[in-house]
Image (cartoon, rainbow, N blue to C red):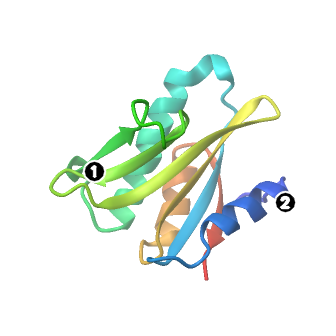
Amino acid sequence: MSETLDDDLYARTKALLDPGEIQLNGVIVDTDLASDEEPTLHQATIDVGDVIAEAAGFEPTETYVYSGTDDEEFGVNQHQGLTLDDDAFVWECQQLMREGTYDVVFYYEADADQEAIVEGIEELGFGATSVYGE
């Protein structure tokens, strides 16, 4: 597991996990992808989403990515993984440009296998920092 280099990003991610209707955990995915690599970033988001879906007990083929570009309440670099059957929440992420490269913050229900998520992300070639909710 990689060290979080940005304490502020970790604290902001932790705040997203504050108790709400469901208990959440998260992961900060450290990429070295720059703004001119958005197609690669898009594929990385899908790949990490598939890792999370599997760790949450879903087949990746049972989920899809909703990118709310037509939804005024949804940020342009904010995406959700939802189930095909009933649009149930699987994961959500925010792609953040920080110091010239993207970090992607994912959060999902806390019963997903956190260790498998981190290992899967690292196998994709990215750094991963766990962030546990309450």
Residue at x-position 56% and y-position 23% = 38
Q: Which mark is residue 50?
A: none
Q: How crowded is the residue under tag 1: few (<14 C-alpha within 10 Å), some, or many (20+)?
A: some
Of badges 1 and 2, the one in the foreground is 2
Judged from this view, the residue extending furthest toward the front is 72
Residue at x-position 77% and y-position 55% = 9
Residue at x-position 56% and y-position 79% = 19
Residue type highlighted by circle 1:
Pro
> Residue 133's spot in the image, x, y percent?
60, 76
| Mark 1 vs 2, N-terminal side | 2
Give the labeled residue for mark 2. Answer: 7
> Residue 30's spot in the image, x, y percent?
68, 45
Residue type highlighted by circle 2:
Asp
> Residue 35's spot in the image, x, y percent?
66, 22
Picture quadrant of residue 33: top right
Q: How crowded is the residue under tag 2: few (<14 C-alpha within 10 Å), some, or many (20+)?
A: few
Judged from this view, the residue extending furthest toward the top is 36
The vertical placement of 107 against 72, above or below, is below
Secondary structure category for the residue under label 2: helix
Q: CA distance from mark 1 to mark 2?
A: 32 Å
Secondary structure category for the residue under label 1: helix
Residue at x-position 18% and y-position 58% = 86
> Residue 115's spot in the image, x, y percent?
52, 70
Q: Which mark is residue 60?
A: 1
Query: How many numbered circles does the render carry?
Result: 2
**Residue 42 falls left or right of residue 2:** left
